[in-house]
Image: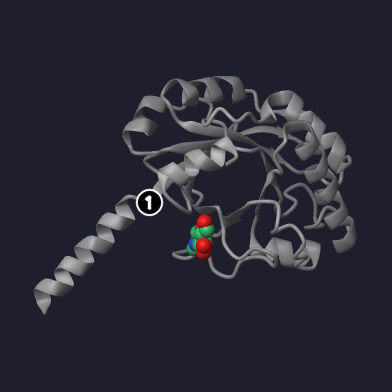
Amino acid sequence: MMKKLAALLLCASVAYSETVKGIDVSGYQPNVNWNTVKANGIKFVYIKATEGTGYKNPSFNSQYTGATNVGLIRGSYHFARPDVSSGAVQANYFVSNGGGWSGDGITLPGVVDLEYNPYGTNKCYGLSAAGMVNWIRDFSNTYKTKTGRPPVIYTSTSWWQLCTGNYGGFGSENPLWIARYASTPGTLPAGWAFYSFWQYTDNASPNPGDGDYWNGSLANLQKFARGG
Ligand SMILES: *[C@@H]1O[C@H](CO)[C@@H](O)[C@H](O)[C@H]1NC(C)=O
């Protein structure tokens, strides 16, 4: 009995260690040792490219090149500022500054990062739920037209509920990257039956940045990158 249990636990822990791990980094991590990140078993990285229409991550090029050179699957994200310009304008700015996608198998689709407004007291950037849904739709449609892929939506369930009224209309097209710093991803936002990525911590130590999981195998992640 004990032996069986031990074997089961071993199995479970082996499966767990095969979980595909990634990180995400921004201008706060200007000097990443990509060889170390790779040696630590990280398979993918999302790198901040842009924010609003007036900010480009100054470390983007070196981070993206560094990740590419060690063979990581990588992609980029845009920090949404729905208070400063339209979704279309920001999607174009993102694509023009590192946010593009190609089906080469090592490029992840771009991400629109939707989270609590860090710059003001209005958590939803002053938009109504309907206004926010329209902003996201505008960003997503523009990104898809430009790149051929709908963007991944990064958000937390609490922000999504508060700022979109828990709108359920994006799950059929946009992959979900759920943010939740806990032992489970918890209840997902409306419209998504599963997540594609889960940011489970804001401290990926010993790696830089935040820690993420891909929901699936490495082969599935490669397939996702190719767009298949
Ligand atoms: C992982 O993704 C699969 C589809 O690829 C889905 O069926 C499953 O529910 C997902 N798991 C979680 C925990 O979201």
Q: Position of residue 224 (x, y in %)?
A: 55, 42
Quarter of the image containing the N terminus? Answer: bottom left
Give the answer, above or below, for where 156 lies relative to 75.
Answer: below
Label 1 beta carbon less than 8 Å to ligand 1: no
Toward the viewer: 32 or 91?
91
Query: Which of the 4 quarters of the picture holds residue 190?
Result: bottom right
Q: Position of residue 79 (x, y in %)?
A: 71, 41
Can residue 105 be seen?
yes
Q: Position of residue 133 (x, y in %)?
A: 83, 57
Can residue 25 be seen?
no
Q: Answer with left or right where residue 66 lies relative to residue 47.
A: left
Q: Which residue is mark 1?
A: 19
Q: Answer with left or right where residue 197 lies relative to residue 156.
A: left
Give the answer, above or below, for where 176 lies relative to 187.
Answer: above
Q: Label 1 amino acid? A: Thr
Toward the viewer: 31 or 186?
186
Mark 1: give few (<14), some (14-19) or many (20+) Cα within 10 Å: some
